[in-house]
Amino acid sequence: MSFPRANLKRFNEVRGCAPPVGSYDPKELAAVPAVGFDKSSRFKTSKENLPGLGSLTADTTLSCSQPSLNQTPLKMQKPSKSSSQTGAVETKIKELEKEVKRLLKEKIQVEKSFHLKEEDMKKLEGRFHNAQTDRCALQARLAALDKELKEAQKSNDVLKSK
């Protein structure tokens, strides 16, 4: 496949995106003030719209499988609670905190008693080991004395028979 021959003017054409030579003076434009834009109300945050600590709910009417590209996200709304409900919840939280503190103290006491009993058990194991070694030594001494007694009885019988 062959391409048609390009015009020679193509690189010499005047383009319309730049001003013609001599018409641009940077000193003139330096005196013009900069353009400023005002923020629109879209970016302002109100105190009502600020998210809380997990106390927000969302209306989930859209399915997850069909994303909405042209729609704005649903506004998160705070659940409305009466003061009696919040007071009851706060008292429940305080009671649970007291229960947790009590259980932690009880856990610490149980751990202390456990460590004390472990130390006592180690001491008793040491005493038991010492008693076993003493028992083995006494059994060996008893066996030696029994042997000596038998020899003494034999020698006594020999002397009596003479």
Image (cartoon, rainbow, N blue to C red):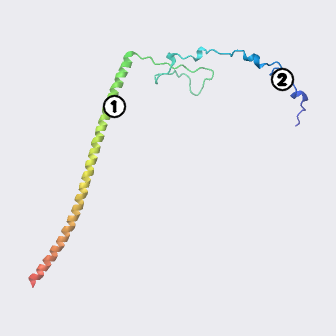
Q: Position of residue 33 (x, y in %)?
A: 69, 15
Residue in the image at 28% along x and 38% along y: 109
SS for dot 1 = helix
Q: Which quarter of the rendering shows the N terminus?
A: top right
Q: Is residue 61 left or right of residue 154?
A: right
SS for dot 2 = loop
Q: Is residue 9 left or right of residue 121?
A: right
Q: Quadrant of residue 84?
A: top left
Front-lying residue, 69 or 119: 119
Q: Would residue 7 be visible to someone looking at this image?
A: no
Residue beneath disc 2: 15
Q: Quadrant of residue 91?
A: top left
Front-lying residue, 10 or 95: 10
- Toward the front, the furthest residue is 27
Front-lying residue, 63 or 42: 42
Q: Is residue 19 left or right of residue 72?
A: right
Label 2 crowding class (10 Å Cα cut-off): few <14, some 14-19, many 20+?
A: few
Identify whether 63 is placed above or below 141.
Answer: above
Residue beneath disc 1: 100
Identify whether 2 is placed above or below 158.
Answer: above
Q: Would residue 104 be visible to someone looking at this image?
A: yes
Ranked by sequence position, the earlier of labels 1 and 2 is 2
Label 1 crowding class (10 Å Cα cut-off): few <14, some 14-19, many 20+?
A: few
**Residues tagged 1 and 2 counted as in contact (Cβ below 8 A):** no
Q: Position of residue 119 (x, y in %)?
A: 27, 48
- Toward the bottom, the furthest residue is 162
Residue in the image at 13% along x and 80% along y: 155
The amino acid at mark 1 is Val
Q: Nearer the viewer, mark 1 or mark 2?
A: 2
Q: Quadrant of residue 130?
A: bottom left
Q: Which quarter of the rendering shows the C terminus?
A: bottom left
Q: Position of residue 31 (x, y in %)?
A: 72, 15
